[in-house]
Image (cartoon, helix red, strand yellow):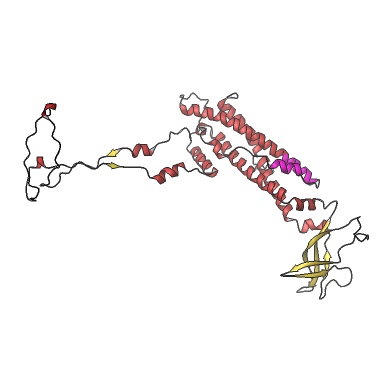
């Protein structure tokens, strides 16, 4: 928070000298190192002559007042480099938001419109509100763009068309707002409601960016598979089959995905000039081996050599949905919930980024002024 003055502990503690305690005279009999005499011309008071002591005689005694005194050793206290480095290390958006939320719990939110004493903290909060309003407005523009591209993509997918242009546009959209935008804006002086909206908006914007990246990866990385499934209404392909074997209580069918899908119907003729026909057999993997299974045409479907029975592609989606399409629907649902919220459950309504962003702009205008 910029409204709190940083305390340079190293400056406060690392440069001061702390006395080690009162002076303790050394044992009697230890001579003091010889000093440099000061000439009398400088007005130094004359000192009484000190008795000479034989340094070789450990038992020689001198008066206590003439005993040499050692100066106490200065102690320097310095901040650990690890502490300094720890203060410099950045935190993730989660920790930034957590720190801001902790400020909320302190109950320091007040209304700036009240007659409060002018201070640097208030001035910082007013400037912060103006800056945040502009940043939220820029984020709102990207959110609107993302919502529009997503809506167009959904319409095309519903019409069994691959959203080529929309996939390209998704890659260039990014909502420019996260927890770092809240730092240094003096939001501790905002109303609690405004602070909560800012925290939720920052978190939601980060979530939307991550969800958009996942959706873009699914659409862009599975284009061929998506196009194949979208063409099912006009050019349905058989992708699954079943073969009959003897089960515990009688014959039963085993599902088998075909190695190569084939068209259910086609007006085109084959290379030999004959009318289009289904394959007569299929090569499928059985462990490390490849086996050839014939397509069932008539007679007993089971037996020692089971035969493949094609599955109607119009019934496939209800029984065996494609994992790519399942993931695609999931990612679209998540990002729509983030952008538009969830108002379908009474009592558990959730605001989306589209609504929260516009509410925030109005709240910040009340603090910093519409033209700030």
Q: Is residue 66 visible?
A: yes
Closer to the camera, 25 or 232? 25
Please check the rendered image and state whether residue 331 is part of the magenta-colored stretch, yes or no: no
- Give coordinates of residue 41: x percent, y percent: 12, 27
Q: Is residue 133 left or right of residue 24?
A: right
Residue found at the far bottom of this picture: 304
**Quadrant of the image containing the C terminus:** top right
How many tags in the picture?
0
- Give coordinates of residue 25: x percent, y percent: 15, 44
- Give coordinates of residue 296: x percent, y percent: 86, 68
Closer to the camera, 136 or 53? 53
Q: Is residue 359 visible?
A: no
Instruction: Say which quarter of the image contains residue 313.
Output: bottom right
Residue beneath the point at 49% across and 27% down? 122
Residue beneath the point at 38% across and 39% down? 9
- The relative height of residue 190 versus residue 260 in the rendered view (above or below) is above
Closer to the camera, 192 or 313? 313
Instruction: Say which quarter of the image contains residue 307.
Output: bottom right
- The relative height of residue 283 versus residue 75 in the rendered view (above or below) is below
Q: Is residue 74 left or right of residue 154?
A: left
Instruction: Say which quarter of the image contains residue 86.
Output: top left
Which residue range is magenta in the image?
A: 149-171
Task: Please name the predominant secondary structure of the magenta segment in the image.
Answer: helix
- Give coordinates of residue 246: x percent, y percent: 79, 74
Residue beneath the point at 54% across and 35% down? 192
Q: Is residue 346 left or right of residue 83?
A: right
Q: Is residue 149 left or right of residue 58?
A: right
Closer to the camera, 181 or 72? 72
Residue beneath the point at 9% across and 33% down? 47
């Amino acid at each position: 928070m910029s409204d709190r003055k940083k305390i340079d502990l190293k400056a406060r503690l690392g440069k001061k000298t702390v006395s080690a305690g009162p002076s303790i005279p050394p044992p009697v009999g230890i001579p003091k190192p010889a000093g440099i005499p000061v000439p009398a011309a400088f007005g130094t008071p004359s000192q009484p002559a000190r008795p000479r002591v034989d340094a070789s005689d450990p038992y020689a005694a001198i008066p206590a007042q003439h005993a040499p005194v050692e100066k106490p050793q200065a102690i320097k206290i310095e901040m650990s480099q690890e502490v300094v480095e720890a203060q410099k290390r950045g935190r993730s958006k989660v920790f930034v938001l957590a720190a801001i939320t902790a400020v909320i719990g302190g109950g320091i939110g007040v209304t700036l419109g009240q007659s409060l004493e002018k201070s640097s903290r208030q001035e910082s909060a007013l400037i912060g509100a103006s800056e945040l309003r502009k940043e939220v407005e820029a984020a709102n523009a990207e959110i609107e763009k993302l919502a529009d591209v997503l809506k167009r993509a959904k319409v095309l997918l519903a019409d069994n068309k691959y959203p080529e242009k929309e996939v390209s546009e998704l890659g260039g959209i990014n909502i420019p707002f996260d927890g770092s935008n809240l730092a240094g804006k003096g939001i501790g002086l905002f109303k609690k409601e405004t602070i909560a909206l800012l925290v939720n908006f920052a978190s939601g914007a980060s979530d939307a960016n991550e969800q958009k990246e996942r959706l873009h990866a699914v659409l862009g990385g599975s284009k061929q598979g998506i196009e194949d499934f979208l063409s099912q209404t006009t050019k349905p392909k058989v992708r699954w089959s079943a073969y009959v074997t003897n089960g515990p209580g009688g014959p039963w069918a085993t599902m088998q995905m075909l190695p190569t899908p084939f068209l259910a119907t086609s007006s085109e003729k084959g290379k030999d000039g004959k009318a289009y026909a289904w394959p007569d057999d299929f090569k499928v993997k059985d462990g490390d081996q490849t086996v050839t299974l014939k397509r069932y045409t008539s007679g007993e479907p089971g037996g020692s050599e089971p035969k493949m029975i094609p599955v109607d592609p119009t019934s496939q989606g209800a029984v065996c949905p494609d994992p790519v399409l399942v993931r695609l629907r999931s990612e679209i649902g998540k990002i729509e919930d983030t952008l538009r919220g969830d108002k379908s459950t009474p009592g558990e309504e959730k605001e989306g980024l589209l609504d929260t962003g516009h509410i925030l702009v109005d709240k910040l205008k009340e603090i910093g002024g519409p033209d700030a």
